[in-house]
Amino acid sequence: MNFVFLVTGLLFVFVLGYIFSYNRKNIRIRPIAMMLIAQLVLSFFILNTTIGLSIISAISKLFDTLMGYGVEGVNFVFGGMENEPGAVFFLNVLLPIVFISVLIGILNFIKVLPFFIKYVGMGMSKLNGMGKLENYVAVSSALFGQSEVFLTTKEQLNKISKRRLYTLCTSAMSAVSVSVIGAYMTMLEPKYVVVGIIINIFSALIVANLLNPYELKPEEDYTVINDEADHKEKESFFQMISEAIMDGFKVAVIVGAMLIGFIALMAMINNLFDLIFHISFQEILGYVFAPIAFIMGIPWSEAVAAGGIMATKLVTNEFVAILSFQDIAANLSAKTEAIVSVFLISFANFSSIGIITGAVKALNDKRGSEVASFGLKLLFGSTLASILSATLVGLFM
């Protein structure tokens, strides 16, 4: 049955991608097939081999340790409040992001991350035949996040076509930031977090290839030529540390503020719907998304509950959806847990349209307006990418 649902899920993504494609005749089957094979191999290796599970265990322990170091700083400032019963989410999960941000800054400063991104992106370019810039952004988005990645492509924004810009933005919205991976791992099974991050890179490019196919001339196939850092005086190590700390704190505060606003809004809407229609808003969303959840391989008895979580992520953000998912995950099958968990590992939601538009607009006003013009199609594409990733994982459960 798993194979049957793999086929139905893939058909759902590919049929919708074909229907809404900008240029159906230019869809290239070979790159899509190569990336699908890569996803299947990687998913199987991570989820079903001793070596893969050992790697996941090591990564999980690493992030547990790093989050523990982060809590040491929180403990000094807040006097152990995070260890008290009922300690708030902000102290336990969000504030340790500050320390993870510092580590990312250090790895970037000593050129480890740029080296990794460059050569992994070049390898993927050989695999899928897509542009070097597209693959660079796909990989770097998974490390830097959906808005920060555009800082490294500032010089290219004026040179690329609107079609290429859509592909770059789809990759950015389909990714997550390394700075929040530790937080995700405290709320979801770590192996699903890792596999979701990896295969989402490919899913975003597959969907972009369906919705937005184009061919590049040799002279257009460049990567990041002039990083923004090359145009300013190199900052000192401790200046970088200070900026990384502030960046991490901003992420923690922004996520916390969004949780307050979205969870309160969802509670009010649920209550209003319950009073008027005797059914919560999330339940209604669950019924709307239930057929999609079923096509992805989720048992029909759990499709409404799972669909409600998926829809919650779309209309709010992944943190709100994950917190809701924690309340029901224990009552769901392992397969449903895997599929929903991987679906949640991306920034594909309505608020991300504004985040990406604002990030690009801050660097290039004209290109930012173009991003706003295809914002809904951008959300559509990144959601299809999440569906594709989650469907593939369901095969191995």
Image (spheres, helix red, strand yellow):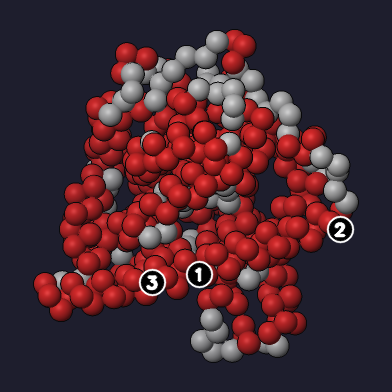
Q: Residue at x 52, y 33 (%)?
A: 366
In this rendering, the answer to whether 212 lies above or below 250 is above
To which quarter of the image does residue 262 belong? bottom left
Where residue 189 appears, as percent x and y from the top left, is: 48, 61
To which quarter of the image does residue 387 belong? top left
Residue neighbourhood size for the residue with mark 2, other residues' Cα within 10 Å, grouped as few (<14), some (14–19), many (≥20): few
Q: Amino acid at mark 3?
A: Ile
Q: Secondary structure at mark 3?
A: helix
Q: Which residue is mark 1?
A: 257
Q: Secondary structure at mark 1?
A: helix
Q: Which residue is mark 3?
A: 263
Q: Amino acid at mark 2?
A: Phe
CB atoms of marks 2 and 1 within 8 Å: no
- 312 or 395: nearer the eye? 312
In this rendering, the answer to whether 257 lies above or below 237 is below
Camera sees residue 21: yes
Residue neighbourhood size for the residue with mark 3, other residues' Cα within 10 Å, grouped as few (<14), some (14–19), many (≥20): some
Q: Residue at x 28, y 45 (%)?
A: 296
Where residue 346 appears, as percent x and y from the top left, is: 46, 50
Q: Which mark is residue 238?
A: 2
In this rendering, the answer to whether 270 lies above or below 30 is below
Q: Is residue 76 found left or right of 340 in the rendered image?
A: right
Q: Residue at x 25, y 36 (%)?
A: 12
Q: Residue at x 72, y 42 (%)?
A: 113
Q: Amino acid at mark 1?
A: Ala
Mark 3 vs 2, N-terminal side: 2
* C-alpha gap between disc 3 and disc 2: 37 Å
